[in-house]
Amino acid sequence: MTTSTLDPRTMQNLRTVFKYFNRVMLLHWHLGLGRLVNAWPAVMGRYMVIVHTGRKSGKRRYTPVNYAEVDGELYCTAGFGNISDWYKNMQIHPEIEVWLPDGWWSGVAEDITDSPDKYRLLKQVLIGSGFVAPLLGVDPHHLSEAQLLEIAKDYRLVQIRRVALRTGSDGPGKWVWAWPFVATALAMLALRPHGRAEKR
């Protein structure tokens, strides 16, 4: 089973699942846990957050995606093809930002789906997805070049060139200030007496 062979209802259900998964993933980044999210890449995958501009709203949008770094450049793929909102936004506004485990960058996104090096780059991105690609029936470790390219024929391959290192208060970890409050609340719950006191 692959995304290219799924019926429309199953495709929509998968997009909904990933939508909620992405919200949880984004929360981790806001709390300063980007490194933790990427602590087990062989299984859980490699993640970065793309900050892009809505093509209709003009607002900042945040999308966690799997990625690979090859020869110093970043690559990701739109597994649902050109219907992915973040992909459509980048087609209109290629100037983006990326949150990586070790930094926050401004950058420029470009569709390189027709690159002669597509197989090598796409394979690395799919390996970087951890469990996600095999979940969709795509095993980048065992598929031949022809098989992988056929399965992923609707995928869009995107290259992101980092331009400048970013700093400020609106990047990854902007909610890290909440940790002392969370720790205090958890401590209070742990210390709270359980059950009613025994009557004498």
Image (spheres, rainbow, N blue to C red):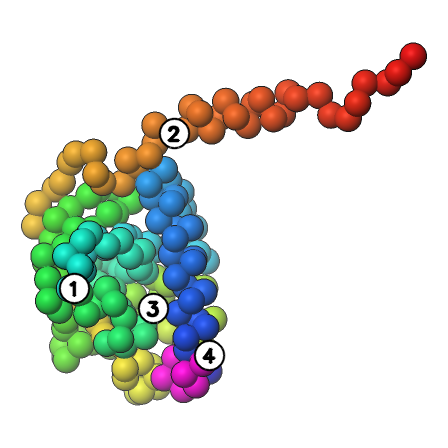
Question: Main structural element of the magenta stretch: helix, strand or loop?
Answer: loop
Q: Amino acid at mark 4?
A: Thr
The residue carrying mark 4 is 10
Which of marks 3 and 2 precedes in the sequence? 3
Q: State whether residue 2 is above or below residue 61.
A: below
Residue range of the region highlighted in magenta in the rendering: 2-9
Could you say whether the residue bearing mark 2 is in a helix, strand or loop? helix
Real-space CA distance between mark 2 and mark 1, rounded to the nearest whole angstrom: 32 Å
From the viewer's side, name the closer residue of 168 and 2: 168
Q: Residue furthest right?
A: 200
Mark number, residue 126: 3
The residue carrying mark 1 is 56
Real-space CA distance between mark 2 and mark 4, rounded to the nearest whole angstrom: 37 Å
Q: Amino acid at mark 2?
A: Ala
Residue 162 seen from this side: no
Mark number, residue 178: 2
Q: x, y (%) of residue 198?
A: 86, 18
Q: Amino acid at mark 1?
A: Lys
- Would you say 169 lies left or right of 131 here? left
Tag 2 near tag 1, CB within 8 Å: no
**Quadrant of the drawing holding the C terminus:** top right
Residue at x-position 49% and y-position 26%: 183
